[in-house]
Amino acid sequence: MKLCFVSYARNNNLDKRLTKFIDKLKQQLPQHLPHDINLDDLAFFDVAAIQSGDDWMKRLADEARQSKVCLCFYSPPYFTSQYSGREVQVFLIRLREWQQDVANAGRDARVILPIIWVPAKPPAALAPFQYADDGMPEEYLKYGLLPLALRNGNSARYNAVLNEVAKRIAQTVNTVQLPVGPPIASFDSIPSAFEETPTTRYGIAVLVLAEPAQSAQPFAASPNSSLDALIEQVAEVCSAPARALTLTGNVAKQIGTALNAREMPLLVAHKTSIESPLNAALIRTIVDALDATATVVILSDPTPDVASAEAALSPLFRLQLQNIQGKSGEAGCLTATDAASFIGNVSRRLARLKQDMMLKDPAARVTDSALAAAAASQGIATAAKPVLSGPGG
């Protein structure tokens, strides 16, 4: 078990100055720790700790759930790094479990230690962690550690920051013992602590890929049923709030945020839009971001064979759909030929998915009040210990 987990953005270490700071910190730390400390256990820094051939994702996950302190090197690229956000999230979950222990009531645990590398406003999740106090040099607080490091790391202010960081690490490891987190099945599934998540939980995240006229009137036989109206009816039947995602360049990120909030993606597309070569790249991006909780609805005019709309899809899109279906063990693609089949088929699937997610998801509800409230509204218990096995530089 390492004392420190170094969480940083690789863009901030291209010149290896961050590495030099960590090396100096490892030399400074033993002066503040018990004599018998193992020098190999001072810090986990992936640049030095992960060797060729290692399962680096497993190493990263194991160290994040076991290390005692997380050193966060604040900077603009750091706060946009998915992996850095996941690393912090693991520590936040462990910290919440520590805080729930009645023996720790009223105690402070500075297990997340911010270091200003380049000044940047931290996200809300890190707001409680003080980083601009009187114990640090004024120049550091104003400009960050990087300008001090650019002076070859020998300035008095640089060394003052180094010594203060070492003292704070020692104070924490000598007084706080975070619980070791359970094994992490997939580090990619941990949500980033840096992303703002929707306020709704177990809702529906809707993507529409159809011409405007087809959205306003998807079925010729139902002229008064717009797609918006149909989705509103599905949301009402399922008691699952629906919100629209946008078909922009960051659509994959939007889907990821929705999945982290336990929203069920609903892709509604007219067959002609799905098959358009102009949409091929967009479709590939969307489907690659979906998981087993996704539902794809193909809008089609009535035909003798209701399944023909799906059967007529391109081989590539059918293969992508099969990948989604294989994750859930059931068909994630539905064909709707009229308003009744849309509302009935989509509502039944989403209601079943929502119930299954709630029953399988007690761990996340412990640390997410919105998830807990949504589950409680359905009479599903929320008392459970957190684990890091699902949704989630």
Image: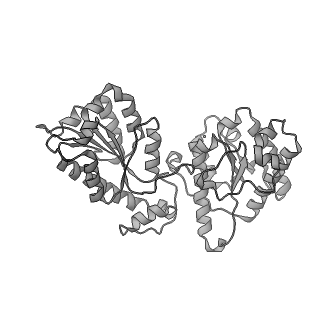
In the rendered image, residue 219, in percent from the top left (x then y), is placed at 18, 41
Image location (x, y in percent) of residue 16: 74, 34
User: Where residue 68 appears, x then y in whole percent?
Assistant: 69, 56
Judging from the image, the colouring scheme is one colour
Residue extending farthest top: 277
Give the residue at x 30% y 55%.
Answer: 235
Along the line of sight, the residue nearer the viewer: 84 or 187: 84
Q: 19 or 374, which is in the foreground?
A: 374
| Residue 364 visible somewhere in the drawing | yes
Q: How many marks?
A: 0
Quarter of the image with the C terminus in it: top right
Camera-side residue of 340 and 143: 143
Residue 362 in sight in this render: no
Q: Quadrant of residue 81?
A: top right
Q: Quadrant of residue 318?
A: top left
Task: Give the percent coordinates (x, y) of residue 162.
Answer: 82, 48
| Position of residue 244 in the picture relative to residue 306 (left or right) | right
Q: Based on the displayed image, in which of its 4 quarters is residue 302 positioned? A: top left
Relative to 196, is 275 above or below? above
Which corner quadrant holds the N terminus? bottom right
Q: Residue at the spot x=35%, y=39% of the render?
A: 323
